[in-house]
Amino acid sequence: MNHQIDGIAQIAGRLNDEMHLAADRRIWQQINEGLLAQAPNEACVFVLTRPSRGVIRTTVILGEILWPMPGEVKATPRRLDISAEYISRVLDSATDAGPSVGICLVHTHPRSESGEGVAEFSPRDDWYEQRLFPTLIVGRQNSIAASIVLGSSGDVNARAWWQSNGGVLTQNVHAVRIVGPELTIIETPSSCWTDHPDPLVMDRSTRLWGKEGRRRLQNLRAGFVGCGGTGSISIFAVATMGVGKILAWDKDIAAAQNRHRTAGITKDYVGKPKVVALKALAESVATAEPFEMKCWQDWGTTTEGLNRLKDCDIIFCCVDKLAPRVPLNDLAYAHLIPTFDMSSWIHFDGNKQVDALMTHAHVWSPGIPCAWCRETLSSRILIQEAQGNQRNIEDRAPYGMPINETDGVEPSVLPLNMLGVSLALMQFMQVALKIADRTPRDLKFFLPNWELDESDRTTRPDCECISSIGAGDTFIIRPVTMD
Amino acid sequence: MEPSSELQDAVRELSELSGHLFCISPRPVTGTSLFVVHTEDQSFRPEYTMQSGVFGFRVPFNFPDAGPEDSFFIRPVEIKLRSPDPVRGSIELHRAAKVDGFVAESALGNVPVLIFSWHLWNKIPWNRRKHKLLDHYTHCIRRFELPEHDS
């Protein structure tokens, strides 16, 4: 729909099916606290943005906050005047930050004597932004700009702005994702979320997380990379819990020997892609309505897979190798998509007796140490994996020891995998529905101690899980395939 | 599996920066996801019976997320010391070991090589956004040129 205001057309465009804004929780809090503290006056601030372009969803990620200097903004309860100096300074900052970096204008509608301030773009907002945004985006075709209005009750409205064929287009934002140790999703007036048509089906779980939690699960899009021992159980569980949209990847064909530890692989599915078996299972148990599952018989960490994962609100990392964890860990922080990593491990002593086993679940999300901080990932560990059946050859060969050949197949049992998945699902409930005060770091259960341990590793100050937060497509993520 | 374009570019850059022509194996070493990167014209220490030969190392397919192995190799395997080292009284390169299957599928063929193994990246860990193959090569050469025995 085109609005005609004072002779200037605001042209509604369509950058993608879904449009989101996302912000690291700390940045969102700083913006809100800084602006709302100036009530009853309106207030505004410019924030740099970076794009995260998925297949059906584009997200504009908020980054550095560029607060106005004294005198750069004149504010009253009903009006803002932004100086040319402030705009010029912001344009310089965006230019310095790179061609994909855009600009977001955030302003408030504070509470006044006439009541709560509502997050609606006023005709004056429209008029002003139609004049402002062509200036902010001219010559910056790779960037996406945005404008946000904050109401006084926590309500939010937003729209994206971009340049296309010389014109300036805008699209309403459907939701704002606030991402830290937990995920908060604020729906805008353009939200396309729907409620479950038969809430009684979800009665027992709704008693824990309420109607809002049920609505969130119904509309959440969860990605699953790997549909084997942990992935199959995870998909079964979240489909049962009421998650409405699932994307899943696995390149493997189901074998008879997968059946004893993988959900959904009946005899009929032996010889068929695992994802096909999982889709049938998920559709048979799903409680969300509508429910949609899309699957690909491919690695989830190809270039295309990583692009599709940007459409997800959360991701379950259910791979059995370390190498694909690298791009998934990167994606979690750079694109603000909380990811649940899980794996199990069984160790033998010299007599081929099990002397230790472990399963773990780790949330990768801003505010929680990443896989590199936790040392689940390191260059040395990745090298060892790449060494395959020559593992640790550099330690053995110089001493005349033979290459330690293995067939690369490790034991795997359902109870251990289920325990790891259960830990990840508890973390999922916390991240998506905030059932407790705090999201844990890496959780690890291990034998022979029968102990559940939370990692005490902290975030390394020089780690990319800090510097890459919200970097979106400006952060290079390398695809990984294991062919 | 072929080496990624990023890895091939890194090998080209290594050749330019080191002054040695390095090449990369078209396929990973059998049973691994490691590619062999080697040059034919590396100068060896004057104490060796050969003045130059093959020098190389192995790099994971997911370079630079993972750095090169903490080792390097030389050929031919018949290289000895010109005179016995003063500690062992031997002309064998006791720092290195002859290994088969280490460079299978490389342009060298499945030939034995002498592997030198050290902790090259234990003090400053490999940084995937910062370090280059030249940094690894420099590490290797620095250790290679140390005396046969740390006295």
Image: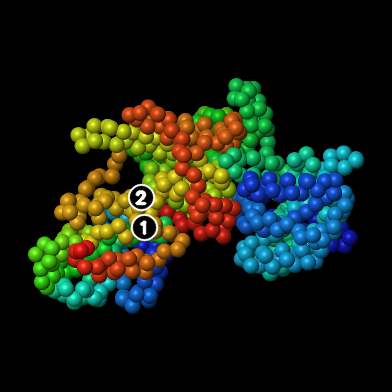
Can you see residue A257? no
- C-beta proximity under 8 Å, tags 1 and 2: no
Type of residue at label 1? Lys
The residue that mark 1 highlights is: B123
- Where is residue B113 drawn, in percent x and y? 19, 63
- Residue A96 locus on image (x, y percent): 64, 67
Q: Is residue B143 above or below residue A309?
A: below
Is A25 on the left-hand or right-hand side of A35?
A: left
- Relative to residue A340, is residue B72 depicted above or below? below
Q: Residue at x 35, y 50 (%)?
A: A381
Q: Is residue A83 left or right of residue A229?
A: right
**Chain identity of mark 1:** B
Q: Secondary structure at mark 1?
A: loop
Dividing the picture into quarters, in which one does residue B11 lie? bottom left
Secondary structure beneath dot 2 equals helix
Label 1: how many Cα within 10 Å (few below 14, some 14–19, many 20+):
few
Decide if residue A367 is in sight here: yes
Residue A344 in the image, given as x and y percentages of width and height: 38, 37
The residue nearer to you, when weighing A158 against B55, is B55
| Residue A263 in the image: above or below residue A105 | above
Give the amino acid at mark 2: Ile
